Image (cartoon, coloured by chain):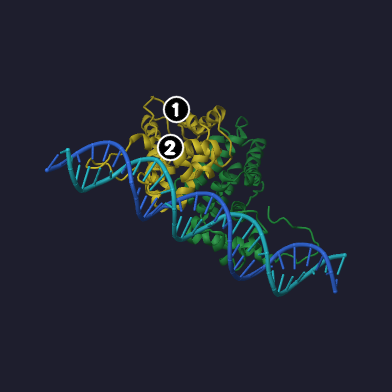
Chain colours: A green, B yellow, C cyan, D blue
Amino acid sequence: MAGVRVERGPGRPRQEHVTGAVLSAVLELVTEQGLSAVTMDAVAARAGVSKPAIYRRWPGKHELVLAAAETRIGVLAVPDLGDFRAELRAVLDARLDVYRIPGTARLLAGLIAAVEEEGAVRGAYQRYVSRTMGETRKILERGIARGDVRADVDVQAAATLVAAPLIFRLVIEQQVPDARFAADLADMIARAVGSPA
Amino acid sequence: MAGVRVERGPGRPRQEHVTGAVLSAVLELVTEQGLSAVTMDAVAARAGVSKPAIYRRWPGKHELVLAAAETRIGVLAVPDLGDFRAELRAVLDARLDVYRIPGTARLLAGLIAAVEEEGAVRGAYQRYVSRTMGETRKILERGIARGDVRADVDVQAAATLVAAPLIFRLVIEQQVPDARFAADLADMIARAVGSPA
DNA sequence: GCCAAAACGATACCGAGAGTACCGTTATCC
DNA sequence: GGATAACGGTACTCTCGGTATCGTTTTGGC
């Protein structure tokens, strides 16, 4: 995902702090001033780094935005809590915490635009999305095995039902989701996929 | 939303076909070559129109993209069908028809990016979103009045649950939703908000 | 018929931003 | 000590959004 050069060899090695400084600069700029303020010059200046140093690590702006987004919205794993409902709450609450960080909506919007514009980013993005959705699928499959999730649900469709509403409210409705909304979602989704018992 | 000059008066009137040709050009370009191909010069050339003619109608690219998106994803109204489940299917199927048109994912991505970048577009966008969600809210409220939707659901949250999954699958998961997915959604949402009866 | 007004196409232009090339310098491996 | 490669700095090219200006054309009002 990151730079091209990983193996050791002759030549001056990368200065590790540069990578972190650049990613932080992207997150700061997008939070404080929005997407349009994230120019390569502004990022370089904010990070105290030269522009070529950025291009040695990422092939272009789209990839940089993707990398910055990944540091924010990482893949989270939920352990077996013995109860589908509890695990559902855990997923929603964890996502809620991330989406409530200021600037996340703008960051996601930039990510979506970057993926749509640049086919090169799509591969890494696809892997990220399927990994994230995979965690939710696991919870559903545990629930089916356990018996507190209906055996006849389409797991992939149900995973989308879980993942979509929070991000929709943030990015499309342009409102920061709150705990009440997450709780309502948990109720509705539990009825949607839970065993009738 | 469109041009500034509506009232009649002296001077050469707008040529109506220009507006339509420009909007069509945007949709064609985004469908055939993606978002990055939608440059003002390309739009002008494709529409057989001069660039100033575009700027007489929309103040900037963001507004143009919003206008083009609105011609595609209009607000749809669902009549009272006497049954919540049937109306739910009607909403999902109608949305499905639109989202399956090639290029719609790219168009939506462009819209999201435009809104996030340009505060000026936000007002019109907000009105559009709340109008669209309002139609879904109406269906839920009819259902509550009728008795086939639980009276204790949060209508706004439920509307998000209905609207989010299709668009999420298209824009985030990067897959065109199919009829099977829409049917699964209808099943799950009906259990989520339908009366226990 | 004539004039003001405003849209039209065409073109040239400006400024900003993405990305690249080249510099001399510095750090590391062999 | 030499090859390698990252570093900051700078200057550059190219593309794109947006504006200005031109002469031309089409309308309404007198």
Residue in front for this viewpoint, A65 or A180: A65
What label sits on residue B48 in the rendered view?
Answer: 2
Local SS, label 2 = loop
Tell me the chain of label 1: B
Picture layout, residue A117 above or below residue A37 = above
Q: Chain of mark 2?
A: B
The answer to whether A140 is drawn above or below residue A64 in the figure is above
Q: Nearer the viewer, residue B141 or C17?
A: C17
Mark 1 belongs to which amino acid?
Ala
Look at the numbered discs 1 and 2 and tell me whether their residues touch, using CB distance below 8 Å.
no
| Co-location on one chain, circles 1 and 2 | yes
Can you give x and y, in whole percent of width and height, for residue A77 in the image? Answer: 65, 49
What number is the disc on residue B90?
Answer: 1
Q: Where residue B97 sits: x, y (%)?
A: 49, 29
| Front residue of A118 and B7 | B7
Earlier along the polypeptide chain: callout 1 or callout 2? 2
Residue D26 on image: x %, y % = 28, 36
Q: Position of residue A3 (x, y in %)?
A: 70, 56
Q: Amino acid at mark 2?
A: Gly
In percent of the image, x 49 and y 51: which residue is there?
A: A179
Which one is closest to the eye, mark 1 or mark 2?
Answer: 2
What residue is at 56 percent from the left and 35 percent from the top? A193
Q: Mark 1 falls on what kind of element?
A: helix
Would residue A164 appear left or right of B150 to someone viewing this image?
A: right
Is residue A192 placed above or below B113 in the rendered structure?
above
Q: Alpha-carbon neighbours of circle 1 within 10 Å: few (<14), some, or many (≥20)?
A: some
Q: Is residue A1 visible?
A: yes
Q: Judge by depth and name the residue closer to the eye, C18 or A180.
A: C18
Residue B172's mark?
none
